[in-house]
Image (spheres, rainbow, N blue to C red):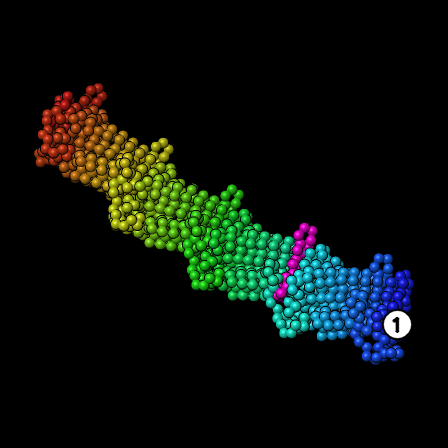
Amino acid sequence: HVVGNLQVDDETTLNLEPGAVLKFSPGTQLLVYGTLNAPGLSDQPVVLTSSNDDFTGETIDGSTGSPMSGDWKGLYCYGYSGYDGIISMQHGKVLYGGSAEAEGSSAVYLYYSDSALLETTVVAQSGQWGINSLNCSPVLSGCLLDANTSGGMTSGGGAPELVNNTFTNNGGWAVVLASASLTAYSGNTGSANGFNGLGLLNGTLNTSATWTQVDPSFPFILVGTVNIVDEVSLTLPAGTLVKAADQALLLVNGNLYCTGSSGNEVQFVSLKDDSQGGDTNGDGPSQGFPGDWLGIKGYGYSGANGILALDWTVIRHAGGTTGSTGGVFASYSDDTQLSHCTIGQCSASGIVMEYCSPVLVDCLLEQNLGHGLDGHGNGPTVLTDNHFNQNGGWGAQLVSSTLTDYNGNTGTGNGMNGLALNGTVTSDRVWNQPDPGFPFVLTGTVVVNDDVSLTLPAGTLVKGADHAMLLVNGSLICPGTEMDPVRLVSLKEDAFGGDTNGDGPSSGSPGDWLGVKCYGYTYFDGIADLDWTIIQHGGGSSGSQGGLYLSYCDWAQLDDCTFQSCSSSGSVVEYCSPVFERCLFNDNRGHGLYAGNSTATQLTDNTFDGNTGWGALLSSVTLLDYSGNMGTGNGINGFGLSGTVSANRIWNEVSPSFPFVLTGSTLVNDDASLTLPAGTLLKCMSNGQLLVYGSLICPGTPEAPVQLVSFRDDSQGGDTNGDGPSSGSPGNWLGVTCYGYSSNDGIADLDHTVIRHAGGATGGQAGLRLQYCDTATFEDCTIGQCSSNGISVEYCSPAFTRCLSEYNLASGLTATGSACDLLDNHFEHNTSWGVWLDAATLTDYSGNTGVGNGVNGLGLRGTVHNDRTWQNPDASFPFILTGTVTVDAGVSLNLAPGLVCKSQPTGLIYVFGTLNAGGQASAPVHLTSLQDDSVGGDTGGDGAINPMPGDWKGVTLNGYSSNDGIGNLNWCYIDFAGNGQSALQA
């Protein structure tokens, strides 16, 4: 019977033998500065109890027989400073202590104890706490703490060890460890406590440990911040339940391993959630809410680990009251792997990750008020077979991250129902999508690095937010199919993937996002391999780029693709050689396709419809074969071309309603040929010019001529430029020049070809200009309505057969220093000469006619080097000497019956060879003045002017030396000659 304080001095030991019973009067205590050993036995416990306790040991005089909580102070082990304060108790009982004046407000107060071991000990009926441990490391094993008024056990500091203890009926916490160095906890259970769990308040795990749990109805409870230090691991086995109080945080600088299993998950939930572990906080029926606690933070900055390895783990109600963090927050984590996890009902995002490389497999992120997943500045974030449902923001969002493979991720009911991406693809990746209802969404610039490929399989849907762009420095591979195309469209487009951004019914608009840019400058690849791929709504708000922008690409192949509804052109190409086959360019606010700056764009069987600008415009490019392209309803409904043909090429046209249009100078290189098949319509703008150093081949037919006409000519191909009804005018474009000087060819082979409206605004060149051509053959061609000469020939030998030159503002044909073969041609209503050949090598001329020309005849000055015959079927289109015509020695010039040859004042036929004028009585040969309207009519168009003697020189036959000077003239009239010589001088 202890009637006063019982004190064990420092360095001394009190041994309480098995069965010892100490009863304490009110106000007394056992104060241990030294050591207390109490090795009780299961049938002979050591008991420290109230003097009113008659249930154990002798009845003390004055006992009430009704012991009460707080009847005495308790056991006080004091180890501060140099004291020991040691206790070792087995099978002990400490009952009815914890009076109001008790030190430490507890029945057992361990204060800086050097050592404290309590095994199979009962601490019960305390008026305050059962046990209070301060700055020491007690070990409790198999103990029972029951019916203590304030709580079972509290601890401040130290490293308490708790194994297989039971906490029941305590008024407050079953047990709460504050600011402790946390250790392993296993086998502890409890029931009917005010807070029925193992509370961990602001503690630190300094050594690796495992926390096991007999019954989830007695969970671990996080209060404040619990920290796992670097290089230390905490393992939570399957079935572990952790609840968290207001603003609690599990801070992992080391490692957290949660080894749950299906149906036996590790769970982190709100302290208020009664659905798991019951009413832990004793507040009556309640449920957890978003933000009830902060969550789990894996922090690996600097030398820390921050490792999270969670399997079959459930995390709910986190994020904090301000929603400032995710349920799981991984920052600079060395390794974060979550599989089969559920993170839900958080006040912010379910998971927030920054500057790490997490892996999520088969996880569920649901009902979070922020995003399902929010990643920033991460390395490769692996997302496979995850489900993002009913989150307030994005299903998942990765910003400025290293992008990786994404497979099998789905989502429904999110505020932004997609996987948002902004970052860099640094190795070969494939983005798979089980359901376009949960699309990939580009929220900024996504870069595919050089030597890296991104593959979007058939059926993939990618949406683009405002200013989003897919920038491909490596390779983009889209193997879509007709039934399952790859689509890249506006975030606002609900027709595909539904209402992804949750803004109600909407459709995409041109420029809603920037588009796809493949960039291969210097050592980059910029490769595009797209099949059955649809790109819509690109170009940006300023229309600064195409939906697909190809620049310096190493290679680009686009088959069966669609480029639609872009704010600028559907596709823009520069400095590369892409191939477009069977593609559709429609409803773009710029051109369907624009290619410039040294490109070589192959276009086959494409369709260009409803574009605001050109259907297709290729400017200053390397020109290739074009076939099967068609278009309707474009602002300029044609295929605009300027550039260079550097190899043999053919331009085929499906319909003249979608013609080729020369927008500037188009050059056919030497040793290269351009073929315009029968039926081709080529329209030309003001600076349009076809400059042929190689060969131009136009195999037109009577039913399907090749036509080169003004851009404004609606009579051919319709209203190509969309300016309303208009017709071509002389000089609307520059024309065709074939140039064979030096090593160039300048070859022309034209059949049934029409050239109109050429010559340029200033009339500076002919519609058809032939210079130094190697060969030039024209059959059944028409050259008309040119602002200068219809045809101009210089220093070459073209052949014109059955051609028409009409309504040209200068001459029908002029030639200088050339040898033109003219057979059965017609020259009509040209402002100046029908034909004017000057300093020419004169050839055979027959069957040529003309009417209504300014000078209605075939003007000649030059030399006959070979036997030639001149014949004109119609005297109204005579030959006209504009100067001296020389017939070389050994050569005959034959003038056919009925020929009329008029002459200007300097006109002279000078014969060193033979002149045969084979007239007949009914068809004499007439050699006369240009002023002579009596034969051939008013050839000079000068009205009725009488011819005069000496209007021209005449005929000279010169046989001197080795010359012949022969003249055989029959029925030949030489009239009004004699200008400075005899009319006929031999």
Residue 401 appears left or right of 718: right
In percent of width and height, residue 289 lies at: 60, 67
In percent of width and height, residue 934 lies at: 9, 33
In percent of width and height, residue 56 lies at: 86, 78
Where is the C terminus found, in terms of image quarters? top left
Q: Is residue 312 or residue 921 the one in the foreground?
A: 312
Snapshot quadrant of residue 584? bottom left
Q: Is residue 234 or residue 663 the one in the foreground?
A: 234
At 15% from the left and 24% from the top, the residue drawn is: 953
What is the tally of numbered marks visible in this picture? 1
Label 1, on which residue?
Answer: 3
At 58% from the left and 63% from the top, the residue drawn is: 347
In percent of width and height, residue 277 lies at: 67, 72
State whether residue 319 is above or below residue 704.
below
Going by the numbered disc 1, the residue's amino acid type is: Val
**Dot 1: element:** loop
At 86% from the left and 73% from the top, the residue drawn is: 25
Residue 856 magenta-highlighted: no
Snapshot quadrant of residue 116? bottom right
State whether residue 321 is above or below residue 218.
above
Q: Residue furthest top?
A: 961
| Residues rendered magenta in the picture | 292-318
Q: Is residue 472 or residue 211 the one in the foreground?
A: 211
State whether residue 896 is above or below residue 358.
above
Snapshot quadrant of residue 862? top left
Q: Is residue 898 or residue 781 the one in the foreground?
A: 781
At 30% from the left and 50% from the top, the residue drawn is: 722
Q: Is residue 214 visible?
A: no
Residue 311 magenta-highlighted: yes
Mark 1, other Cα within 10 Å: few <14 / some 14–19 / many ≥20: few
